[in-house]
Image: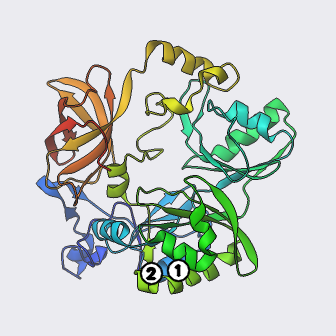
Amino acid sequence: MRRAFLQPPDPPPRADPRDADGGGGAAGRHRPRVHARGCRTVSARLAPSRRLRRTPFSDGVEAAGVSAYTVYNRMLLPAAFESVEADYRHLKDHVQLWDVSAERQVELRGPGAVQLLKVLTPRDLSKLRLNRGLYIPVVDADGGMLNDPVLLQVDADAFWVSIADSDLLLWIKGLAIAHGFDLTVSEPDVSPLAVQGPKAEALMARVFGDAVCDLRFFGAGRFRFRDHDFVVTRSGYSKQGGFEIYVEGHARGMPLWEALMEAGADLEVRAGCPNLIERIEGGLLSYGNDMTTANSPLECGLDRYVDAGRLDHCIGGAALAAQRETGPARRIRPIAIEADSLPPCDRAWPLYVGAAHVGQITSAAISPDFGGGVAIGMVSRGHWDAGAEFEVETQAGRYRAVIRDGFWA
């Protein structure tokens, strides 16, 4: 089994990260890798323990040659296989299976579930119904983002909140207790497996039947595989199209993985994972990277998920109402960087106009398809218009950057 490393991986394609300099001796093992302009980064191995949870698909992921992991909701999340660039190209051309079990579910079950959900989010929930997913911002009392999950109704009084990387389970349990709502809140044994890429429909139809292709975006349904009806949604963390399969029960994971791999052999299916380059091109935000509790939904461009009629009834509503009146002081923007190579964006990169600090870049990569650097950043009011120019300061030096009209894809 290949040893996997923490994100970001940086060896050239097919190289072993432990031998990035080509040497196998003590010097080769301990010499840091050198990036553009002499910036050094070091990959560190993960120390396995029960605190760092494996997934129902970990055996398949490791057999497929995962080369990097990150940690998400205290669970392993693959970050690269061949390389970020090679994985990007394959995702855009073929089909991949993504182990996204780390997108844990918080289950709300009982007659008080809807009451709690209306307190939880400023989004209008009038369109909530069976077999329909909703993207919902969740904020604290100051209007700061706590999470940006997908809400899915799976039964008459049961809902799954499919969370990004934060302890939303504890927050929701606290709300349930504080308000005395009549429901149970738990983390069920449910692990999503994503099928992403332009050939995803063809593969899913082979395993679940042609009816799965009738799902609309964020639509859901139950589809049989062997002896179980799986919840399947047309969704996923890419702009290439695809589905997410909610696998109930750890033991069902590998049989489904193996069936999809076998059925998709001629489609060039392979293991993959959310891809940094592709998500930046498509403007897909990452909680913990592009937005944190320091940012409101309005700053993150999520205005359409903040309903003015609900701000008197949800947590953080007063703060969001005040910000709607004044307008946000900063905004998420797509930013192009003039660069042929960039170091890993593992810290916020300041944006400057002259000596003035006017924002930061939070995610960045070099795009093979669009050329140069593609980035997501938070920019101060007065500087966020398309065409605005900056200098971005990275650990490898300064680069020229400019705001775009929109994201690349």
**Measuring 18% from the left and 38% from the top, which residue is drawn there?**
401
- Relative image position of residue 311 (x, y in whole percent): 64, 21
In the rendered image, which residue does mark 1 sit on? Answer: 60
Observer able to see residue 53: no
Three-letter code, disc 1: Gly
Q: Is residue 58 above or below residue 175?
A: below
Q: Position of residue 272 (x, y in %)?
A: 43, 70
Could you tell me which residue is drawn at 82 percent across and 50 percent down? 156
State the residue at coordinates (21%, 49%).
373
- Amino acid on which the number 2 mark rests in the picture: Ala
Vertical placement of residue 127 versus 323, above or below: below
* Residue that numbered label 2 is attached to: 64
Mark 1–mark 2 distance (CA, rounded to whole Å):
6 Å
Between 21 and 209, the one nearer to me in the picture = 209
Residue 53 in the image: x percent, y percent?
Answer: 60, 66
Q: Are marks 1 and 2 in contact (CB under 8 Å)?
A: yes
The kind of secondary structure element at disc 1 is helix
* Left or right for 59, reference 177: left
Q: Secondary structure at mark 2?
A: loop
